[in-house]
Image (cartoon, rainbow, N blue to C red):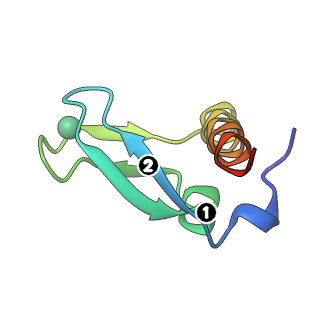
Amino acid sequence: MTLSPSLYDDIFHHPCPSCGEKHKKTGRWFAIVARYHCLNCNAEILLKYPQKIAIFNAHSILKNKEVS
Ligand SMILES: [Zn+2]
């Protein structure tokens, strides 16, 4: 499992672990950033490599469901 560049232009939804606020960003953005702050509660959200993989993986599963 890698960070597939074919998903870079897709919009991913990532909920804040603290308040559940959904953040909409592109795959490219998730691949690049190391951390961000929640727009709602200002919690710092770390995006380490395993988290990035999980986000890409979840999105790719969701995408496959939509297609089939
Ligand atoms: Zn939050």
Please identify the quadrant where the N terminus is shown: top right
Question: What x and y, as percent, mark residue 20?
Answer: 25, 32
Question: What x and y, as percent, mark residue 33?
Answer: 53, 59
Please identify the quadrant where the C terminus is shown: top right
Label 2 amino acid?
Answer: His
Viewer-closest of 43 and 9: 9
Residue 32: which disc?
A: 1
Viewer-closest of 37 and 23: 23
The quarter of the picture where residue 62 lies is top right
Q: Secondary structure at mark 1?
A: helix
The quarter of the picture where residue 24 lies is bottom left
Name the residue beneath numbered marker 2.
13
Residue at position x 30%, y 40% in the image = 44
Cα gap from disc 1 to disc 2, whole angstroms? 16 Å
Report crowding for label 2: few under 14, some 14 to 19, many 20 or more residues within 10 A (C-alpha): some
**Does ligand 1 reach within 8 Å of label 1's beta carbon?**
no
Residue at position x 22%, y 41% in the image = 21
